[in-house]
Amino acid sequence: NAGVTQTPKFRVLKTGQSMTLLCAQDMNHEYMYWYRQDPGMGLRLIHYSVGEGTTAKGEVPDGYNVSRLKKQNFLLGLESAAPSQTSVYFCASSYTTGGYTFGSGTRLTVV
Amino acid sequence: AQSVTQPDIHITVSEGASLELRCNYSYGATPYLFWYVQSPGQGLQLLLKYFSGDTLVQGIKGFEAEFKRSQSSFNLRKPSVHWSDAAEYFCAVGDERTGTASKLTFGTGTRLQVTL
């Protein structure tokens, strides 16, 4: 019972590089989310998806793009990484009435 | 828009003592409310949730929370804390615009330290 799986777990990027974070869930959840966690700021919503083929902006979407081509996968892309994007990124999935199931996080450092 | 405030950044309690973590929310109707716990280097785990009905909800690991509409609060409690409860705790509220438990807004968290 995998739940929500995030890859990679750690990554160091140079400023200007690009990368994609992958989130996969096996619970048939409709909703998927990407949050970033920074000290003293809690979790802030980057983008979310209410179903396959749909995405929407959250609270802090600038500098990120997402895609949900398959129901079980939600990809977060950084086209040109900046030091301000150094953070821990969490993916989560849910039904409309349930609590979230979180992945274990990706720790990203941009130098 | 909805919001969540956790006024205590850091709390220290002795093992065996009782615990109360505060959470205040801003929401125009009856909210969906959640408490999550995060151990160091881990993702967040759901402790309990409130949707409607009984205002005292029971969760995992011996935690409970009480919804008080008049105070816009959803405080988390535990009668006797164990050293393994040391972690960061997050309160969250559902989406006011859609009235669902999706698109949660999180508080900034309370870090709990347990002394032996």
Image (tube, rainbow, N blue to C red):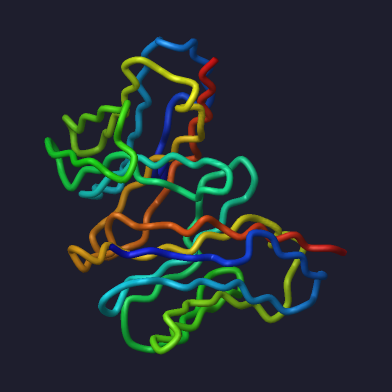
Q: Quadrant of residue A69?
A: top left
> Residue B25: x, y in percent?
41, 71
In front of the other: B72 or A3: B72
Quadrant, the N terminus of chain B: bottom left
In front of the other: A9 or A83: A83
Q: Quadrant of residue A96?
A: bottom left
> Residue B34: x, y in percent?
43, 67
| Whether residue B65 is situated above or below residue B105 in the rendered picture | below
**Residue at left offset 31%, top offset 74%:** B31
| Whether residue A13 is situated above or below residue B43 in the rendered picture | above
Would residue B57 be found to the left or right of residue B7 on screen?
left
**Residue at left offset 39%, top offset 86%:** B69
Quadrant, the C terminus of chain B: bottom right
**Residue at left offset 61%, top offset 55%:** B88
In front of the other: A12 or A111: A111
> Residue B4: x, y in percent?
43, 65
Q: Quadrant of residue B40?
A: top right
> Residue B97: x, y in percent?
19, 63
| Whether residue B9 is situated above or below residue B52 in the rendered picture | above
